[in-house]
Image (cartoon, grey):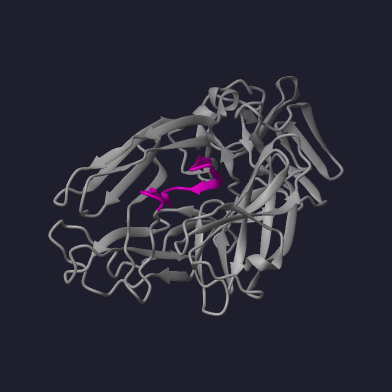
Amino acid sequence: MAPPRLVVDGNTSRAAIMINTDPGDTAANIADSSFADPLANFGDWKWAGHPDVDYLGIVSAKTGSVPFYVNAGGWVLQETPPPDVAPYKYRRTLFAHGLSYTPIVIGYLTVDGHNLPLAGDSYFNIPSGSDQGYHVFNVYADATNVYLYTEINGGNFRPSSGPVYNYTVYVCNMGLDGSGNLVRPPLNSGFEASGSRLRCGRFDTNYGYFYKDTSGAVPIYRGRSLSIDIGRYPSSSTTHALGYVFNVNGYNLTSKRTLSTTDDIGWSWPGTDSSAASLQKMSAAMPAASPALDAGSGRITFGNVLDTDRNMFLISNAILNKTVTIPSSTVTSLTSYLNETLTYDLGSVHPNATDVLGLVTFDGQTRSLGGTNVVYFQNLPMRGSRYQEQSGNVSQLAATLFFDIAISGGKLVLTAKRKVPRLTNTRTYRGTTIKVNALVGAFDY
């Protein structure tokens, strides 16, 4: 195996740190297959500035604080549930991003000292005296603004005070145009490395970049983010409730999960499973000076922005656009119930892909998508009713759909689970349409 080397070809706007080149290569021979086609040869290079290679870069970084009580102002009600039934859905504009496309946004909300991911749904609990109950939050963008979405499962209780949490949001150099197509960084001709700037192909140190860092502050999901199920108390033939466990980055939130929920249809809650979801942590390298190029060691450093000994987040596929429809279903009698798992293929991804970012839209709401096996759950209205969590007093449950989007077997897969408890008469549950715009990528290559 040849030693690492810096290879540059300005005529084709390509540069790379090659670590496993063809045995017959010489320093003058730069036309090997790995250099020409890095996406097909992940194991042969450490970094590439190339027309086909897209690193996820940072256009701007925003920090701020947001009050999680809706009477603070700035919150816009998105959907009004029936009286005395949660959840309430709100949206708040965080800032205008000033770009001509809908960008990917990554970051975190700091809740009680824990950094919770913005890409994908996160959950936290607000105690009595505020908008009590659990909150779902998610940060996403459209063509104009970056928004905070929240669901409040606390009934119609609207206090004038509550917690204020800090957020950090990174607006990225990739995203969607108005038709849902991929927006990529501009292609830089030739190779430039001077002053505080290096650019070649689609790489440019005028952007900041994310890199793998086990102690980093920026988390994205890997693995299950939420355990959720329906249980029925043995002492009741009609009362069901939603049980869930959310445990991410040291923050643990559960509904009551120690009560017996054994029943004759084999459903169970998450039980005592409160294991933490896996996370990929990363740091955000913003532009800085102090460049260095070392062809002998096969390393480039440009201040904090670029160190080719780091693993940066590489987008390894064009965007996947897919819409799936979960059909309606009818429960016909007291003894019937709905308990089904539906799987949808969203498209093939690069074999080295491990993470997914993007947007998901369902029930008229847009949310950010992040990580793998991120669980979203929604209600299936039945005569206007909604799910309710089990919290202290037993709450009846109408129906629930929850789904995750994951990379599995070289494909992006949506798995939806729909559960409806035993009922007293025939009822039809509506279907729903889920639209996914996803980019996939990896740190490991």
Residue at 73 percent of width and 31 percent of height = 200
Q: Residue 158: percent from the left, percent from the top? A: 59, 70
Q: Which residues are magenta?
A: 360-384
Q: Main secondary structure of the magenta part?
A: strand
Side of 168 where 264 appears, left or right: left
Side of 354 where 419 appears, left or right: left
Side of 225 where 180 appears, left or right: right
User: Which residue occupies the foreground of this view, 443 or 16?
Assistant: 443
Asked whether residue 374 is drawn in magenta, I would say yes
User: Which residue occupies the foreground of this view, 117 or 179?
Assistant: 179
Q: Is residue 444 visible?
A: yes
Q: Residue 190: percent from the left, percent from the top? A: 77, 25
Q: Residue 38: percent from the left, percent from the top? A: 56, 29
Question: Which residue is most to the bottom?
Answer: 129
Q: Residue 254: percent from the left, percent from the top? A: 39, 70
In which image quadrant can residue 430 be found? Answer: top left
Residue at 22 percent of width and 53 percent of height = 423
Residue at 60 percent of width and 29 percent of height = 180
Side of 229 where 42 appears, left or right: right
Residue 425's place in the image compared with 2, above or below, is below
Residue 132's place in the image compared with 59, above or below, is below
Q: Is residue 300 visible?
A: no
